[in-house]
Amino acid sequence: MDFPFIQTAVEAVRTQTPLVHCITNYVTVNDCANALIAAGASPIMSDEPADVEDITSICGGLVLNIGTLNQRSIEGMHRAGNRAAELGHAIVLDPVGAGASALRTQTASDLLDELPVRVVRGNMSEIKALAGSAASTRGVDVNPDDVVTDANLVASGRAAQALAAKTGAVIAITGAIDVVADAQRAFAIRNGSPLLGKITGSGCMLSCLVAAYATALPDDALEAAVSAVASMGWAGEVAAARMQPLDGNGSFRTYLLDALYNLTGTELREHARVEPIDLGEGR
Amino acid sequence: MDFPFIQTAVEAVRTQTPLVHCITNYVTVNDCANALIAAGASPIMSDEPADVEDITSICGGLVLNIGTLNQRSIEGMHRAGNRAAELGHAIVLDPVGAGASALRTQTASDLLDELPVRVVRGNMSEIKALAGSAASTRGVDVNPDDVVTDANLVASGRAAQALAAKTGAVIAITGAIDVVADAQRAFAIRNGSPLLGKITGSGCMLSCLVAAYATALPDDALEAAVSAVASMGWAGEVAAARMQPLDGNGSFRTYLLDALYNLTGTELREHARVEPIDLGEGR
Amino acid sequence: MDFPFIQTAVEAVRTQTPLVHCITNYVTVNDCANALIAAGASPIMSDEPADVEDITSICGGLVLNIGTLNQRSIEGMHRAGNRAAELGHAIVLDPVGAGASALRTQTASDLLDELPVRVVRGNMSEIKALAGSAASTRGVDVNPDDVVTDANLVASGRAAQALAAKTGAVIAITGAIDVVADAQRAFAIRNGSPLLGKITGSGCMLSCLVAAYATALPDDALEAAVSAVASMGWAGEVAAARMQPLDGNGSFRTYLLDALYNLTGTELREHARVEPIDLGEGR
């Protein structure tokens, strides 16, 4: 199907250069910054509680990523989040490892309860943990039992929609098939490459891109999230197509940033494999 | 013009392998370490107040970069800075985001007041914020109104010189045209590539290189800073020349480190586009 | 010589996908994560004391790397280490910069005293500092006086063995020639490339790989460490062989991850240059 909003979204980020404040983990932060620049946005990182309110005030979007959280950065997330909420900024929550520790599950839940989060981006295990299910996250990876497949696609869409209805946030569940839903609509995105799971940071980068897209498209967080998810998936395909026999995840990481850098709106509109999910009459 | 000191500087770093203690942000720290190694120097990172005095004591230079500053690292910067000052080490200040938050502006100003900073390296918005002007930093990027051009080159040189005279530090303002000045002399450097602005960390890496150069050339911080600025600019040109159609900022980042790694003194002396700025009679 | 255990070790990591909890420095953490994924393992980073016990509980191995240590992460290391010890996990200590500061030497010694560390991986200066010798670490690099050579290979093996006997840990000393020993046996590994010293993080990545291997081979930490050390050395050779004239340490870093990613058990068994060290009758 053809969704013109995808082209609009890509081009809006490149035209507007949204500033995105990232409170994110130190593992993948460099890739997050370069991915934002590649997409046409501008990153700023700050997690010190005494610094974050000023920094977030000059931005348009905020990413709260709880990988490598600590007591200081948790306080920073709350302070930045509240300031961003006052200013109507697009807030994206990435609940890295929710379900893997009590602190992570609690922190993600607290942030989601307290703040008007516009998009939550995680794998199915993390989303289940946030939804209060008895999730069993395998570290920062999805539990194999939680993988989204064609067989459970409608159920996955319903799970996303239920959490969206409860929280008011768009829910983006990424994996082999991605599911993005708000309380009314749900989409599946079938772009991507298994190589995205062979580098660290593809999820973190995507959460930052979602924030850039949601900042540039303030009136439709669902379309923003769908477009950002498709952009990462398609960039993964472009990067995978460049792989040579001696290449591995080092080269793939480079190619992925390159693909995000060269991505155009018409290209993504043409190659995005986005479809609505019919959640059935009972909804 | 031909400046033999540029060749001397490149070769001095490669010969001496200066140890540089970096208290720097976690966004670009890996690139900073690899850039220092590429140039022939050796990096050490430490920000814990109880660790920094020992670490800086075995080094020759110190970089204080306030990106992702926090209360602990601020204390670490002061303690390391005072120890480095006692030992006569080359201290370089990178006021990342000064003007974007009160904490950053204050921290950078405090460090500059307290320590015998040898070189300050920032964009024009950050330097204006340090100089007490009503700067309006766009996050960690320069405000478009502050870009150095041929039209404002003399005024930019004077601004750098005024801050140099006030603080005793060499002031290096980097952008499309770079301006480096002490209280007596000012230079413009016209090397570089717009791609340097399409990766995170080109400024942070440069500040570390400035520290390596200033450590290897203890008697002339101005020549050290000019040489380091030219090295990053020329490396950017070499990297840009390698770009292929599918390449983006991922590949550019790799090529930039490669270019720094292969840089020789004779090469930089030949390709550096350095010129004195005539600041006029009134000075 | 042919050591079938090397093939077994490589394949065990790829088959088991061990989860490795890393408390490591923010300089090289991204490379550590990608190196673990490249080898077939799965990384999790967490240093907050309130988070580390939960995180380490779902893992099989733990890396304690004291580069960029701070008071919070030191507490995190002790708490994670004690929990990992209760669970019988493979604990690897990387004493980055031991000998360069009192805090680093003390922290590494404390961890080694308190915890049932399975493998210590460092350069000779760091190992000497841990052994209580009057070591003089050159920052995070080995002191030139401490380089392992053919001339001092037996003495180096004895030094490793003595520390192994005292602590119960396998001691892996890496450099131009690598030495790995427990209280009974010692091996030299002659794989590698000088380019491994031209990027930051080759040591940190190796420590993480040692943890992955030791987790996958819980019954023989010596064979695990020898195999992991050989894997990094051989990957360095493969990466070095890909270097083109314009390439530098940026490209080498990418090629190294690629080589780890594509490494197979039969390949490493064929190319590993491992030999027992005869420590003589007096032992």
Image (cartoon, coloured by chain):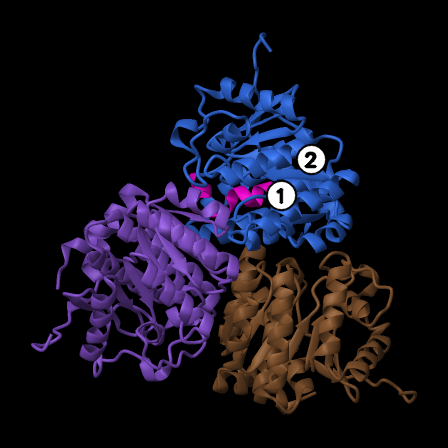
Chain colours: A brown, B purple, C blue
Above or below, C33 against B176 in this view is above
Disc sitting over residue C64 in the figure: 1
**Which residue is the site of mark 2?**
C115
Q: How crowded is mark 1: few (under 14 residues within 10 Å), some or many (20 or more)?
A: many
Amino acid residing under circle 2: Leu
Above or below, B54 against B142 in this view is above
Q: Can residue C52 be found in the magenta stretch?
A: no
Left or right of A100 on screen, residue C209: left
Above or below, C12 against C127 in this view is below
Disc sitting over residue B5 in the figure: none
Q: Where is residue A90 in the image (x, y as percent from the top left)?
A: 62, 82
Q: Is disc 2 placed on a helix, strand or loop?
A: loop
Residue farthest toward the right in the current orientation of the protein: A282
Quadrant of the snapshot with the N terminus of chain C:
top right
Numbered range of the magenta stretch: C194-207
| Label 1 to label 2: alpha-carbon separation | 11 Å
Quadrant of the snapshot with the C terminus of chain C:
top right
Q: Where is residue B48 in the image (x, y as percent from the top left)?
A: 51, 50
Q: Is disc 1 placed on a helix, strand or loop?
A: strand
> Tag 2 or tag 1, which sits nearer the N-term?
1
